[in-house]
Amino acid sequence: MHASHQGNLVRSARRMAPVLSLLALWTASFSTFSAQAQEPATARFHINTQRLQGTLEKLSEFGKNPEGGVTRLGFSETEMAAREYVIGLMKQAGLQVRVDPAGNIFGARAGSEKLPILLFGSHIDSVLHGGNYDGDLGSLGAIEVIRTLNDLSVKTRHPLEVVIWTNEEGNHFGLTTLGSGVAAGELGPENLNRKDDQGLTLADWLRRYGQDPAHLTDARIPPKTLAAFLELHIEQGPNLEEDKIPIGVVQGIVGLKRWMCSASGFANHAGTTPMNRRKDALAAASKEVLAVRDVVRAEPGRQVGTVGFVKVEPGAVNVIPGRAQFPVELRDLDTAVIDRMWQRIQERFKQIDQEENVETSCTPLDDVEPAAVAPAVKSAIYAAGKSLGLATMDLPSGAVQDAQKIAKIAPMGMIFVPSHDGISHSPKEFTPWQDCANGTEVLYRSILLLDNQMNRL
């Protein structure tokens, strides 16, 4: 055998060793899967659990609230400081760091072949009085994967990139998943003049983040750039914890539709207007709020419907309400289910209008399409979980996610870990450290499996 050919085989064997070891462990796990389903499997972990915990605890100091949790809004001084901390971690891990014109942070690790990028990460911005795990786990878990690859001297075929998306929560400018939306080509320069509560525009904040708003469209990721996108996230719901399942395999991200509805009656004197002659907008709206709940509950499945507030006018103790305004939001994996529920809700509203002698009109506000998870990415997550002896559950993401935007331009998948009591967007948001480690190890193994399986001739 020629010496150079022999050398190539040796290098190839070294590169494949971590993947072959992982596949062997996965195969062996099938015979003992049931018995080991709840085993922590700490001894078999590649990631450094204590290091992961340390970085998450440090990040939680940026925007820390006295009652616990954080307020680290996207496009804020607090988030700017947190971004510097995360950029520092990326550089320590040997990543080549860049910030795109939308403020998204990317950290690149070269691959051994010229292949599309395996992208993974999440966000570090929070809601007002939010928790320490939403977005943070997926972001720092992704960096931990890179550090582990470095520790074990693993070279991947695909180039890898960790991403921290900008302004996922959308507290400013009324734009959720802003950074990923720009990257996917869904949002553009038409939003640059939107103002926040301080009167600052999106363009102003991008300049503060060191970017030129005139080049916003340069943040769009060209077609075929990505092999896949993978996001580790807390479930933000009760299902995994209640069923004692450590890993959720997301089947898709729900779509949502929102409307602003207004019940119009007639404001009149509360003391002199007989009950049978009233046009009480609040009474009608109250029935309509319950109608939304009843219609959604009557539909089989995991769909949800919400009325978040009711604004009543004129709002005086001695005046019959003349107008009541309220939003309706419906979510499901199937747009047809959303449309069917909305049709039934409108029929109920008409009945209530006749009963209460008012008129209700609704105007569309938002329409977000559901996003499907790529079968190849789901398969990798299943295999990674089984290789650890961790039971998995299929479930949808009921929350809007960055992965939902990236699904428009690349295959995507999501890994969920349990949320204690199903609480999120709260200082009481909590995921045990072992569950954080489980999810990060599954992310690590999923990346290696995808690297081995994708883009093979």
Image (tube, helix red, strand yellow):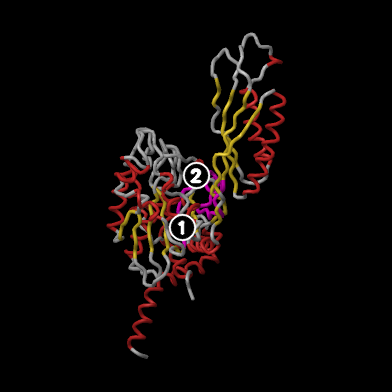
Please name which of the two marks, 2 or 1, marks the residue nearer to the observer: 1
Q: Residues within 10 Å of mark 2 (few under 14, many from 20)?
A: many
Q: Is residue 434 something that shows in the picture?
A: no
The residues colored magenta run: 228-255
Q: Specify which label sits upstream in the sequence, 2 or 1.
A: 1
Q: Residue 43 at x, y = what percent?
A: 40, 60
How many callouts does the rendering have? 2
410 falls in the magenta region: no
Dot label at residue 8: none
Which three-letter amino acid code belongs to the residue tagged 1? Answer: Leu
Q: Residue furthest top?
A: 272
Residue 309 appears left or right of 86 = right
Report the residue marked by disc 1.
230
Report the residue marked by disc 2.
236
Residue ID at (54%, 30%) = 309
Residue ID at (40%, 68%) = 158
Find the distance from the CA under tag 2 to the CA under tag 1. 17 Å
Asked if the residues shown at circle 2 and circle 1 are in contact, with their CB atoms under 8 angstroms apart, the answer is no
Which three-letter amino acid code belongs to the residue tagged 2? Answer: Gln
**353 above or below 306?**
above
Q: Residues within 10 Å of mark 1 (few under 14, many from 20)?
A: many
**397 above or below 148?**
above
Q: Residue 409 at x, y = what percent?
A: 49, 59
Q: Secondary structure at mark 1?
A: strand
- Name the one closer to the observer, 105 or 232: 105
**173 above or below 226?**
above
Q: Secondary structure at mark 2?
A: loop
Residue 105 appears left or right of 340 = left
